[in-house]
Amino acid sequence: MALRRRGRPRKNVSRHERLLMQKILDGNFTVGVVGLGYVGLPMALEFSKNGIRTIGVDLDEKKVRALNSGRNYIQDLNPADIRHVTTKSKKLSASTNIADVKNCDVIYVCVPTPFTPNKDPDISHIVSAATGIAAVLHRGQLVILKSTTFPGTTEKYVKPILDSSKLICGKEYFLAFSPERIDPGNRHWTTKTTPVVVAGVTTACTDLAVAVNKHIIGEVVAVSSPMVAEMEKLLENIFRSVNIALVNEMAQLCDRMGVNIWEVVQAASTKPFGFMPFYPGPGIGGHCILIDPYYLSWAAREHDFVTNFITLAAEVNESMPFYVRSMIEREIAKQPVTLERAKVCLLGMAFKKDVDDLRHSPALKVAELLIDHGIENVSFFDPFIKSVEVHGNVLHSRTRLTEKFLQRQDVVVITTDHSSFDIDFIVSNSRVVIDTRNAAKNIKGSRKNIVLLGEGR
Ligand SMILES: NC(=O)c1ccc[n+]([C@@H]2O[C@H](COP(=O)([O-])OP(=O)(O)OC[C@H]3O[C@@H](n4cnc5c(N)ncnc54)[C@H](O)[C@@H]3O)[C@@H](O)[C@H]2O)c1
């Protein structure tokens, strides 16, 4: 049988490709998902909700235990959906043993890609997952890497590990890269509604990966090689990093020049073409935008190329928590209190609005920097985060904000603009509010005690 790709029949279709394609088209296949975090679990849920038998693998026993007893642990997912697929339809089960993917037709790899303390890429989780898969790999399986990584990872690192099985890529087993675009907290653009990019090592690999993704995603876009897909994912995230750095730099300039950056961005946004608004803040966080520029800069070095522009953007964004600390210290200096005795409360510890993700959070960095400068009375309130560790000490979130507590603070800082914050209440009961997110833009009362980042006051 000749398979059709973009309207043209293709010759030399291997028996294993044909059989796997048939299973996929019939919806009669099994999925394995390695790494059940913010990326892996939503995808495992989507397949299992579609009636596809799915096996999730994670090293974290707590996650595996939670899922196998029907409990959800990812904020955006519906707990009833997780309960249904794990305990009623039983389409989703979890394991800590990667060998359990041996009977899966399609295996997604959704493991973390952090950086080392020196900010070099750490793809050890990908290598370990690929090694585990290689040990049980057999003919007719498709492996799709989803973790964000530098160009070349799929073909130069993952493929040689899978090739150690002695199977032939593109004929006996299949390998593709398909980067993830999930935006936690975004109700509109979900796993299902966000288009994805896919590229296989061979045409057969691409065709199979497109077909399987179509089961759970509305629009699947094939590109010519895994390196293109790996690079386009980095472009998406670096595009954000660079534009956020630009407004962060302009916010600092606006502070000096006495111009309100928020009004400037709003005014520029009235241009119907050629401009997209980005907003300043206390820095960037999460597992993507902060890390990904370093993945590309590292890969560029191998080609005697220095990514000045990208590195500068990362530098500006990483300077923002330091800038916020200096704003806080300036406000403390205006009051009859020493740094050691000053009370500072940070509102919002998660790295962005309405999520419970603390990874690389700029608010956490601000807390660390304040403590480094001898400010001992640092507290925080975040409805999504129970506690954080700062330099080995555990800080617990306030359970609620009271008038009395706010009045006792020398400085209150809005570090994350969670929707549930009662900004009017916060502003009317605090002595000084440093607003790093323009969260108080619509308050009804006086703004006299608000110091807005980039307002130039
Ligand atoms: N979180 C996002 O919004 C997002 C968006 C797009 C892309 N990404 C990318 O997707 C990848 C995964 O990110 P995430 O946010 O889901 O990470 P995560 O930390 O939430 O989840 C990863 C999971 O993989 C598990 N794991 C690690 N090594 C493993 C191994 N060898 N075998 C089995 N399980 C293993 C961890 O225990 C963890 O539960 C990263 O490359 C990230 O850059 C994330």
Image (cartoon, rainbow, N blue to C red):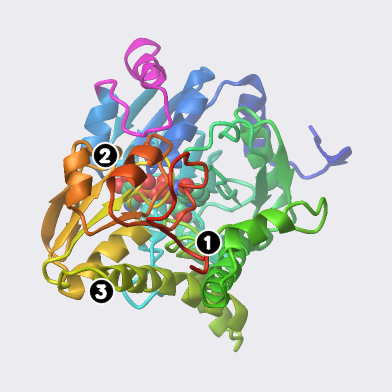
List the single residue furthest toward the top: 88
Rendered location of residue 23, percent (x, y): 61, 25
Compute the Cα span from label 2 to label 1: 41 Å
Residue drawn at 80 percent across, 54 percent down: 271
Q: Is residue 276 magenta?
A: no
Badge 3 vs badge 1, beta-carbon distance below 8 Å: no
Nearest the eye: 45 or 362: 362
Q: Is the CB–ligand 1 distance for label 2 below 8 Å? A: yes
Mark closest to the chain's N terminus, 3 or 2: 2
Nearest the eye: 345 or 219: 345
Query: What range is drawn magenta here?
Result: 69-91
Mark 1 residue type: Pro
Compute the Cα span from label 3 to label 1: 24 Å
Mark 3 residue type: Ala
Q: Is residue 80 magenta?
A: yes
369 with respect to 161 (left or right): left
Which residue was labeled with disc 3? 333
- The numbered mark at residue 96 is 2
Query: In the figure, residue 372 lies in which quadrant?
Result: bottom left
Compute the Cα span from label 3 to label 2: 53 Å
Query: In the figure, residue 227 lies in which quadrant?
Result: bottom right
Which residue was labeled with disc 1? 280
Rendered location of residue 305, percent (x, y): 61, 86
129 with respect to 411 (left or right): right
* Residue 413 in view of the camera: yes
List the single residue furthest toward the bottom: 304
